[in-house]
Amino acid sequence: MYKTPCSRLTALIVINVKQKLSGNICQYSQTVRSLFQLQRRDPTQWLTYQHLNFLKRQYVSKRSSELHQRAIAKRSPPLSPVDDRDESVERQVEKVPTISREEVDEADFKVSAQDESARTESRTEGTSSESPHVQVETDEAKEARLDRQWKQLKVEVSDLPDIYARLAKIKLTALVVTTAAAGYAMAPVPFDPCVFFLASLGTGLASCSANSINQYFEVPFDSNMNRTRNRPLVRGQISPLHAVSFALACGVSGVALLTLTVNPLTGFLGALNIFLYTCCYTPLKRLTIANTWVGAVVGAIPPVMGWTAATGVLGPGALVLGGFLYSWQFPHFNALSWNLKEDYSRGGYRMMSVTHPGMCRRVALRHSIALIGFSTISPMLDLTTWTFPLISLPINLYISFLAFNFYRRADRNSARKLFFCSLWHLPMLLLLALSCKKPRRDADEPQSLSPATQS
């Protein structure tokens, strides 16, 4: 049948494979048959998920008709006294003596007689002693209990100014208006009180609008933070519709005031700042740490708005003032967020202090040193005299020193010192820049031309 050696070898291989397959099939059929028999014989030994999970952790292989176990077998649980799975072991069962019905009735009668005697004794003691004390709730306790309950808060007209002030973050708005006023005062143009007032008012209204919309978007997250859980929208002191109406009124009136009474460029910057703060910075706070840089741009725009309100154009001086605010915000906010990183983590905000603590300290130090560079550039762009870099050097070196301590120690104390230093550093820096403001050229030209006209 097989004439060539190759065909013979192939036939031998095929025969061996068939024999092995037939043996395995017989083993598999026996295993399946045993499983069915086990299932029919005793339902308590059915295979469950726990058995399969145990088999998943145990590896058993068969080599040369021997079992080689690769894992320690799971210990079998101890059998209970009533478990009769092991039929080969006989257990002795203690017989319980029977109780007659007369004995049960006699025992119940004795128990009921004892309970009745105990009740009569307690009644006699209660009548002989003083009457039980009845706790009466006082008016103060009742008011405290009602305050802890959920109730609908009614807004009174007298409370609206305080609610609006907290909704608009009045302290932050005051800082924004101050920086815008500094930008207007640093512009090399004659001072116009009417334009200055309108520009400050429009900038403040735009800031109120942006802060109100920010709080409207962050109500679910502010409720998880200790620093923001007492805001009006979180506590329900004002309805969301009321807050949005207040924000729209402030935003529309502020942008219209800047566009119609100051100039269109300043109105555009106000609208741009509202958009960046509400639609870019606010959602990015929960997505990426780049929100800090976007927020720094938002904080750098108000002094530029003050400059454009005075001059009507964007000049190098406006960019330098914006650079001061841009760099100042990093040591200020990074030091603040360092001590509030647990709060930001509960709120779900991705801040550098939470996700990148090393970067948080490096960026604060880097931009603290950058303030010295902006102070040096100011006289080069005819914004200030050369006295300004010299007199501003001590305060710039001091905040840089505190930023270096914060970078090196990375503790709450150094962060707190850097934060409180940033609070007085910015007003001091702007006051020094205003005192060293370079005189206008149109004021110097008549003095330089007066000798020529006299001759």
Image (cartoon, rainbow, N blue to C red):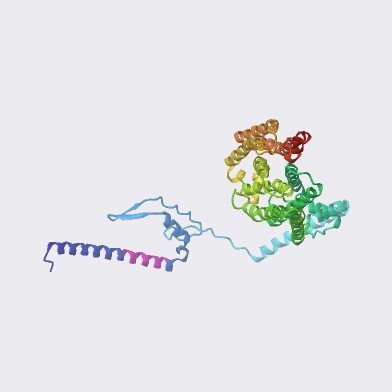
Of residue 386 and residue 397, the one placed in the foreground of this image is 386
Of residue 416 and residue 274, the one placed in the foreground of this image is 274
Q: Does the magenta portion include 31?
A: yes
Of residue 313 and residue 15, the one placed in the foreground of this image is 313
Horizontal and vertical percent position of residue 434: 74, 38
Q: Does the magenta portion include 36?
A: yes
Q: Quadrant of residue 148?
A: bottom right
Horizontal and vertical percent position of residue 90: 45, 58
In this rendering, the count of numbered labels is: 0
Magenta stretch: helix, strand or loop mostly: helix
Q: Quadrant of residue 422?
A: top right
Which span of residues is magenta-colored? 26-38
Q: Quadrant of residue 389?
A: top right
Left or right: residue 214 compared with residue 237: left
Of residue 330 and residue 321, the one placed in the foreground of this image is 321
Q: Quadrant of the C terminus?
A: top right
Q: Residue at the left extreme?
A: 3
Left or right: residue 228 compared with residue 33: right
Q: Residue at x 21, y 64 (%)?
A: 14
Horizontal and vertical percent position of residue 301: 68, 48
Q: Is residue 158 above or below residue 384?
A: below
From this viewpoint, is residue 148 visible? yes
From this viewpoint, is residue 142 visible? no
Horizontal and vertical percent position of residue 87: 43, 61
Q: Is residue 102 above or below residue 231?
A: below
